[in-house]
Amino acid sequence: MNSRVTIRDVAERAGVSVATVSKVLNDRYGVAAATVARVREVIAELGYESSLVARSLRNRRTNVIGILVWAIEPFSAELLKGAARAIRDSGYELVVYSAGEGAENIGWENRCLSRLSGTLIDGAVLVTPTVHASRSDIPVVAVDPHTGDEGAPTVSADNVRGAALATAYLIGLGHRRIGFLGRPPRSLASTHQRETGYRGALAEAGIPFDPDLVRVAGYQEETSKEAVRELLSLPDRPTAIFAANDVSAIVAMDVAVTLGMRVPDDLSIIGFDNVPESRMTDPALTTIDQPIQLMGQRAVEMLVAILGGGEPAETDAQLPTRLVERASCAPPPATVRPIAGLRSVSDGVPR
């Protein structure tokens, strides 16, 4: 395997000094047009790429923005599409850093930023950050932040209104026993906001809040499956489920089908996000749309403005949500069938 092409290789092939190649790479004055053309021709010929680390040491800039996500899943994939759109013609490039399942650990963003900032990226968009990234010496923008004062510009959706829309829609169909699938206590601010909207819509309709109908879906599919099984094993089980994200809603649909239930005849299910996968379920998932791609676009635009020495047009952007009605919800059945083979869950089960 050939070794990496260096700036010295370019200088030698072009018949110029390393300093001259450096000037061409950094668009500096003092090099004849013919020499510039020759050096660039050699760069293309040899496939030379300057090291990000070396570039940052010279210029204190990399012209690279990092996007830190806990995993590449439907939400983050959509957000990256918007981020890529925003980066066009900005002079910046994107690098995506995923912590995978370990992202549930508190402080993962700070550990990632300590590895990347200063030499690899000029700024970062944090997707689902868990802690205040105050130790970072680069600017950050948070998307859908966790609870607590992040101290950074944020982009989020109107989660309270969206959740209220979802719950009110189910109530309007005649449902009174509506389950809620949320996230762990130390989780996204959006999860708490969506539960607030759920509770508010129940109160508005005069329906008492029942904590037995709330379950933690978690971040792993198996955890979500168990949460759905718990809800459906209740003696007075819900006739509808509102999941705080589409992934959990799709899991709920799968579990219901494996238990012999028909969606929406026996159980209505509504999600939140409107990721592309929500249109592909059978039946297609009714959900709350949040403009995920636009959230990614706005976050990058904010960060580019900050990196340019200016101020973003807004520092706490909240984007609207709307109901997308499909086929996974219907009026509750006249008779609620018990689910065979499911053990009743006691009040002692953790929620």
Image (cartoon, grey):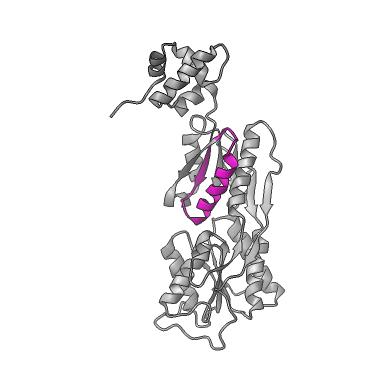
Labels in figure, total = 0
Image: 117 above or below 109: above
Q: As drawn, which residue projects farthest toward the left?
A: 1
Give residue 13's quadrant in the image. Answer: top left
Residue visible at 48% across and 79% down in the picture: 262
Give residue 343's quadrant in the image. Answer: bottom left
- Relative depth, front residue between 200 and 172: 172
Residue 205 colored in magenta in the image: no
Where does residue 86 sit, x and y in percent of width and height?
60, 42
Residue visible at 46% across and 17% down in the picture: 38
Is residue 229 found left or right of 2 in the rendered image? right
Image: 269 above or below 117: below
Where does residue 266 sit, x and y in percent of width and height?
51, 81
Residue 201 seen in the current view? yes
Residue 129 seen in the current view? no
* The N terminus - image quarter: top left
Image: 60 above or below 102: above
- Relative depth, front residue between 340 and 82: 82
Where does residue 255 sit, x and y in percent of width and height?
44, 72
Where does residue 41 sit, x and y in percent of width and height?
45, 21
Residue visible at 68% across and 57% down in the picture: 320
Residue 85 colored in magenta in the image: yes
Is residue 174 found left or right of 13 in the rendered image? right
Give the residues in magenta: 65-92
Q: As drawn, which residue projects farthest toward the bottom?
A: 335
- Relative depth, front residue between 167 and 132: 167
- Relative depth, front residue between 176 and 329: 329
